[in-house]
Amino acid sequence: LADDSLGYMKLARDAEIKQQVHAELVQQAEAARIQQAMESMDIQVVDPASMPREDRPSGPRKKLIAAIGFVIGCMISLGYSLVLYKREG
């Protein structure tokens, strides 16, 4: 019985070591495949980058927003005054 137990422990230890070696080899193969893919990547520049114009900001158009706000404000005030006129008459 003791020999069987020792044999089983030895086989279990060998199996565990082989599993660890296998896991390490798989990890190394994956790393090598990733490295090869990174080295073989060909990067082509289709169009050169264009810089934004310095004389024209890319932010919000303040004048356009102010003009739209003015028009909407006028329309609201005109509508409100028409509602008040209808109530009085």
Image: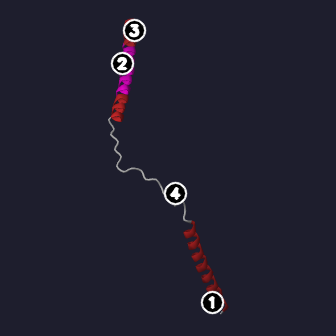
Where's the C terminus, which quadrant? bottom right
Where in the figure is residue 26, as x and y percent of width and height? Answer: 35, 26
The reply to whether the magenta stretch includes residue 43 is no
Amino acid tagged 4:
Glu
**Mark found first going from the N terminus, 3 or 4:** 3
In this rendering, which labeled residue sits more in front, label 3 or label 4? Answer: 4
Task: Name the residue rendered at 34%, 35% in the picture.
Answer: 37
Q: Are marks 1 and 3 in contact (CB under 8 Å)?
A: no
Task: Name the residue rendered at 64%, 85% in the picture.
Answer: 81
In this rendering, which labeled residue sits more in front, label 4 or label 2? Answer: 4
**Mark found first going from the N terminus, 2 or 1:** 2
Where in the figure is residue 71, as x and y percent of width and height? Answer: 57, 77
Residue matched to label 2: 18
Amino acid tagged 1:
Lys
Where's the N terminus, which quadrant? top left
Q: Are marks 2 and 1 in contact (CB under 8 Å)?
A: no
In this rendering, which labeled residue sits more in front, label 4 or label 1? Answer: 4
Residue matched to label 4: 54
Tell me the chief SS of the magenta region.
Answer: helix
Disc 2/disc 3 C-alpha distance (Å): 18 Å
